[in-house]
Image: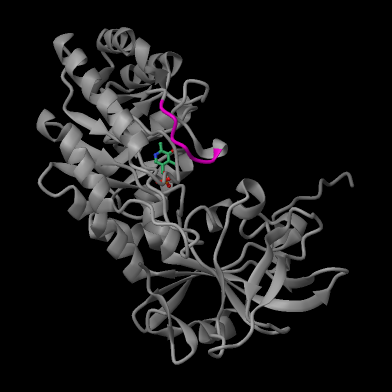
Amino acid sequence: MDHFLYRNGELYAEDVRVSEIAKAVGTPFYLYSSATFRRHFKLFDDALAGMEHLVCFAMKSNSNQAILTLLAKEGAGMDVVSGGEYARAKAAGVPGNRIVFSGVGKTREEMDAALIGGIRQFNVESEPEMIVLNEAALALNVVAPIAIRVNPDVDAKTHEKIATGKSENKFGIPISRAREVYAQAASLTGLKIMGIDVHIGSQLVELEPFEQAYKKVRELTEVLRKDGHEITRLDLGGGLGIPYERSNEAPPLPKEYGALIQDVLGDLGCEIEIEPGRLISGNAGILVSEVIYVKSGEDREFLIIDGAMNDLVRPSMYGAHHDIIPVIEAAPGVEQAKYDIVGPVCESGDTFAKGRNMPPLTAGDLVAFRSAGAYGAVMASEYNSRPLIPEVLVDGDQFAVIRARPTFQDMIDRDTVPSWL
Ligand SMILES: *Cc1c(COP(=O)(O)O)cnc(C)c1O
């Protein structure tokens, strides 16, 4: 559920008309709902009630400072995957002891920054990384809290580019070698083992792969405890999917996911961490765009809009579906038209949808892409020298631009022409 609803035939973001924001900031732009962010965070927080837990927002899904600040105020921790994300989390006021550092290629500089600034735990993904982290900690005279990310070899049944828990994926250490690696970690005095980490992929639409993975984590917890390790924390990753196509998708709810965690792991006495990204931010955002032209092709109509693949890359990168709706609701009973919805970028891949049913639209009409709050703005680029589009946050009846659109001059000024030219 989100807070982008029609009222009197017009799309609203909470209590603000989307068309009013479009007039104020120009199109295209991302638009986020504070109430939806808060609601989604709380769904997870409530789902784990009764167990000691921390919900760490996977900020790679949406890392705007305003969003991080909003979620931090709700009590969220952060899951970061780079030095840049760590710096953003700290700048948003998130204390180090609520920041988890994930990622398969952490550099020594990133480790140093987090060790100095404070960190809840590093999720270590390989033995070479473990050795470098140990050196970094010893050099700074601190101890690095760690969990080791295990790869449980489970099929997440999601898009191949976002599956991470199969043995062929680059992530984590094979669970079959976990005892050996934990023994090595225990021998390194710059490290303190806190627990186990697992993350099997993104946009999972069934609970079963989670269940398989978490059962393996349970077994491993028992084995490692017998080996003499203190396992006090389990980081269960993110990955719960959202309904991108509302008419025919109904992924499991956070409540059901939480119940599964309780069931499989609840009696181990471990603190539970989860790292949801998409389910918190995805449906908390839309992308608003304007129709530039309606063009008749040989056998189809093209809706050419001012948003493009550089603004929202998911359709061209993953073949992803986004529901696209008119900002002015169609009159009841109006006959639908079929459109290929495309952007202005010079690539055929700049196609958002083919043969999509929409009410008839004309130049100047506004459309909204649903479920664009996750992996939208953060993956945008300035390809074709199209400036990064603004992000706007609504809260009740107020709204604010939380990242401004750069001018062409801002874009040009980022480059440097060497003096010899
Ligand atoms: C991407 C990622 C997440 C978040 O995944 P979502 O599908 O957005 O919930 C969590 N943890 C790790 C380690 C990730 O790489």
Q: How is the image coloured?
A: one colour
Quadrant in which ligand 1 is drawn: top left
Q: Where are the magenta residues, as a range?
A: 154-159
* Nearer to us in this view, 123 or 416: 123
Residue plotted at (44% across, 30% down): 155
Residue 7 is drawn in which quadrant?
Answer: bottom left
Q: Is residue 96 visible?
A: no
Residue 400 is drawn in which quadrant?
Answer: bottom left
* Nearer to us in this view, 413 or 170: 170
In the picture, measured across the screen, residue 128 lies left or right of residue 297, that is: left
* Nearer to us in this view, 338 or 236: 338
Q: How many marks?
A: 0
Q: Quadrant of the N terminus?
A: bottom left
Residue plotted at (28% across, 57% down): 41
* Nearer to us in this view, 235 or 324: 324
Vertical side of 181 occupied by 248: above or below: below
Magenta-colored stretch includes residue 87: no
In the picture, measured across the screen, residue 411 lies left or right of residue 282, that is: right
Give percent across and percent down for residue 379: 58, 51
Give percent across and percent down for residue 248: 47, 60
Residue plotted at (32% across, 13% down): 178
Give percent across and percent down for residue 201: 44, 37
Residue 147 is drawn in which quadrant?
Answer: top left
Give percent across and percent down for residue 242: 42, 55
Vertical side of 193 occupied by 197: above or below: below
